[in-house]
Image (cartoon, coloured by chain):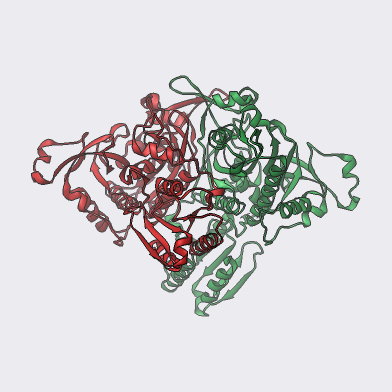
Chain colours: A green, B red
Amino acid sequence: MRLSRYFLPVLKENPADAQIVSHRLMLRAGMIKQSAAGIYSWLPLGYKVLKNIENIVHEEQAKAGHIAMQMPTIQSADLWRESGRYDAFGDEMLRIKDRHDRDMLFTPTAEELITDIFRGAVNSYKDLPLTMYQIQWKFRDERRPRFGVMRGREFYMKDGYNFDLTKEDALHAYNRHLVSYLRTYERMGLQAIPMRADSGAMGGDDTHEFLVLAETGESEVFYDSAVTDLTFGDREIDYDSVEDCAAIMTEFTTKYARTDETHDEALFNEVPEERRRTARGIEVGQIFYFGTKYSESMNATVQGPDGKPALVHMGSHGIGVSRLLGAIIEASHDEKGIIWPEGVTPFHVGIVNLKQGDDEADAACQSLYDAITALGLEPLYDDRNERAGGKFATMDLIGLPWRITVGPRGLKNGVVELTSRKTGESEEMPPEQAVARIAAIYQS
Amino acid sequence: MRLSRYFLPVLKENPADAQIVSHRLMLRAGMIKQSAAGIYSWLPLGYKVLKNIENIVHEEQAKAGHIAMQMPTIQSADLWRESGRYDAFGDEMLRIKDRHDRDMLFTPTAEELITDIFRGAVNSYKDLPLTMYQIQWKFRDERRPRFGVMRGREFYMKDGYNFDLTKEDALHAYNRHLVSYLRTYERMGLQAIPMRADSGAMGGDDTHEFLVLAETGESEVFYDSAVTDLTFGDREIDYDSVEDCAAIMTEFTTKYARTDETHDEALFNEVPEERRRTARGIEVGQIFYFGTKYSESMNATVQGPDGKPALVHMGSHGIGVSRLLGAIIEASHDEKGIIWPEGVTPFHVGIVNLKQGDDEADAACQSLYDAITALGLEPLYDDRNERAGGKFATMDLIGLPWRITVGPRGLKNGVVELTSRKTGESEEMPPEQAVARIAAIYQS
């Protein structure tokens, strides 16, 4: 993309009403624009990152054998009355009357509808296990939306639902989700720690939240510092293996890590003192096993191996897709702006032309642009007639991990400059070598 | 995907309330499920096709230089009051009050919001031309939703908006959209004919609708049969060239083709009689040029080359993404079910195992599955313990363009059977040759 043809309305000033750094930087980098309290438009740069995150979620869900579908945003109130949650949900549910005066709502989550789909189509235990998920816009009418996309009213969420014959099978689904979520977050450059949490309004026995440590986190968390040494890395996993998934669950959830809701001071004190940590965390996902809560209230049964009807065991599993942009920025920025992890960056590399209009510099930039595009990567070429200082400031603000700087002086010596956004280190090299370096960095 | 692990709730019976064939087939093939009047869940098979169509739209918009972003579904009523459309839209607008009793709505289209984004960020003619678009869920509270996804209430739409300094520039944007839409529909295996239409509630001077001819179409259309001979094909086009885009516009819109709203009997009678056609059509897209209608009411100006403020010229351009599934099926089916064009098919090829549990047949199917997957294609392998007849009926119903049938008898002779869904013709060949044929068919 050439910047002269893009829509990137960066702001020079810090927006007055943005309290946390991710909100400020998303506004300043022209990623989002508020249209109403807690409701945002995703401008082109923000939209690209949102889609990158969505794609990673889809890819990891597919690997785990979970099936993508999509439910509508507007639902009838009837199913919610059946489960008993229509009244229970309170003012956070956006309630709507349609032109025929029927009670509708903008869905905040979809246990009811997916259970209805399931019970209408699946009759036998032979069709289990089944896990379906969607990535879809949700609405929660927060009383006081704040922190940009971190606590908006309209938000983009992955919500998945498993249906299993037995508790044991459902706990395997639970573990499978934990594993797939660990991989998902790591691909985004995030460490998200599974912590024992409270099931709250969802009901259910087992639940873990995934928290990214950050000063601006809404939750207070308590953990054994050894949990931050755990990484999933590039291990291969057989998602069908109950043992393999359970082993990962054990590895990642045995050490103490809890939110304030479930914090247990006595247990925490058993952690060696030098490893006890208190911090703040941003919740970026949650997994639940809630047994037969919904299958009972909504009568979702299958014929079991014994020929008798059996209530299915269920769980639900969420990733805050739009919220993740905020969480990633909270975890990865400096005073100049965002620092995108390579897995989610909106453009793979920035090209800065120090002297737009200089024939040699223009040609060199164009040839870098073409070579990088030919690799299947997307460069953002700042081809505007601006001073170098302004171009650097924009690139630093929007946070592309790599920048190639091209100027007449360097070209005389046959070199361009490759700069890491993270370390700030620059290295001169021939253009072809810069392209090769970029290719190697993004080779997956 | 193995069918035993998929969620494909096909129906044997024709649903009683579905009046048109696409609605019937989408329900029977387990692609959608109604959750409320005119509101559908997209089950896995339907969701896959929806995403394929969405991807084609994105790819063609990118080629035309249009920039993707996304606006929220819920908007404040304020902007709609500013443009004067809050009252004008009538009962089709889903109006909502949030918990603080503010007037909100589920957006049916987004001229107001995109114009607000534009005027808040763009100040100079130097930042033009600019075209941004989104693919997002919309809601129109139809009095009588019907025909499945063809006239639903919640629907998925691509809506694009161009901002230009002059009428001439805006008409180039109009032509550019026409060209990109022609390519888009052809990639989906559809002939969509641009017809002069009425601008209706959108206002504006110029507008074309794209119509797919089908008996079940809602609009009556009149055309010179010569328009059905026009195809865009694989021509290369320079979207920046005003002349090239205008030439395509002329080529595709000069011959008589109009909806009943703009039909002119006298003009129609100038078409040679043997080429005059009356038929029905399904609208799958529309392009508008409406000049300064919104920029005036919302005061969207840029500084012109003369230093004075100039109202921008705008247009908007829509593709009915969810509706296209219905249109494609209306145009491509037989008495057995859907016949997907290769460009949008949910799976590239079906594999039918005639004797599940037979070691040789199972191994041959698995090796076909692996070979096709290795090509980057997606097979659907019917690995259920069902009779051949049931498996064939399911494959015919869901409409995959190609099927490979594997059975012990064929394998003894070293062959499998490759069958075209469209022609019904089968050919025996060694498994490797079937894989090579599939590879060649989908090579792009």
Q: Nearer the viewer, residue B382 or B267?
A: B382
Q: Left or right: A348 with respect to A89?
A: left
Residue at 66 percent of width and 50 percent of height: A181
- Name the quarter where the C terminus of chain A is drawn: bottom right
Query: Which residue sits furthest top?
Result: A101
- Name the quarter where the N terminus of chain A is drawn: bottom left
Position above or below: A407 against B223? below
Residue B7: x %, y % from top left? 53, 44
Query: Which residue sits furthest bottom?
Result: A413
Q: Left or right: A268 with respect to B59?
A: right
Q: Nearer the viewer, residue A46 or A273?
A: A273
Residue at 78 percent of width and 46 percent of height: A279
Residue B107: x %, y % from top left? 44, 33
| Res. B299 visible in picture | no
Q: Nearer the viewer, residue B419 or B266?
A: B419
Q: Quadrant of residue B301?
A: top left
Q: How many marks?
A: 0
Q: Nearer the viewer, residue B284 or A399?
A: B284
Residue B195: x %, y % from top left? 23, 43
Position above or below: B391 against A290? below
Q: Left or right: A132 with respect to B424?
A: right
Residue A242: x %, y % from top left? 71, 51
| Res. A360 visible in picture | yes
